[in-house]
Image (cartoon, rainbow, N blue to C red):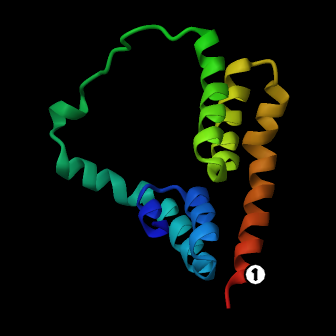
Amino acid sequence: ASIGIIGGADGPTAIFLTTKLAPHLLGAIAVAAYSYMALIPLIQPPIMNLLTTAESRKIKMVQTRVVSKTEKIIFPILVTMFVALLLPDTAPLIGCLMLGNLFKETGCTDRLSDTVQNALMNIVTILLSTAVGSTMV
């Protein structure tokens, strides 16, 4: 399952799933996941060009309706509660994802949002890579 998540280019989810299902594979899965994520900008464009026509790449999608600010704020809250009730083990992962959406949509926490997107992200990446590296033998 962890290897399948790597195909989705989702490193944190691959690491989270690996710690739950196969902790002995954490180092290898983390290195593979983040290596794959780093290579996506090189791998994806030629594949997209091969599998699509020039006309289909030029299609402009139109928004079917305008989503209100209230809907954008309520959505992450409801998703977090719903997921926490159905799948409590995944609540921290989905909660962090939805908290980021909530920060972005409320707009009243610009400084906090900026910190989360930049400084905190770099700090967490360093801590995560150090923790995963320490598990590799």
Query: From the image, which quarter does the N terminus lie in?
Result: bottom left
Reply above or below: 33 against 74: below
Could you classify mark 1 by the number of other residues whose Cα lies within 10 Å: few (under 14), some (14-19), or many (20 or more)?
few
* Residue type at numbered disc 1: Ser
Image spot of residue 26 (x, y percent): 61, 76
Reply above or below: 24 against 113: below
Name the residue beneath numbered marker 1.
134
Image spot of residue 29 (x, y percent): 54, 74
Is residue 109 toward the left or the right of residue 52 in the image?
A: right
Query: From the image, which quarter does the C terminus lie in?
Result: bottom right
Reply above or below: 20 against 80: below
Is residue 78 toward the left or the right of residue 67 in the image?
A: right
Image spot of residue 89 (x, y percent): 65, 53
Q: Residue furthest right?
A: 111
The local secondary structure at tag 1 comes to: helix
Q: Residue at x 52, y 66 (%)?
A: 33
Picture quadrant where residue 112 is located:
top right
Q: Residue furthest front?
A: 85
Q: Residue at x 41, y 64 (%)?
A: 4
In this view of the protein, which residue sits in the foreground, 114 or 71?
71
Image spot of residue 133 (x, y percent): 71, 79
Reply above or below: 54 against 48: above
Q: Residue at x 78, y 34 (%)?
A: 114
Is residue 76 toward the left or the right of residue 109 in the image?
A: left
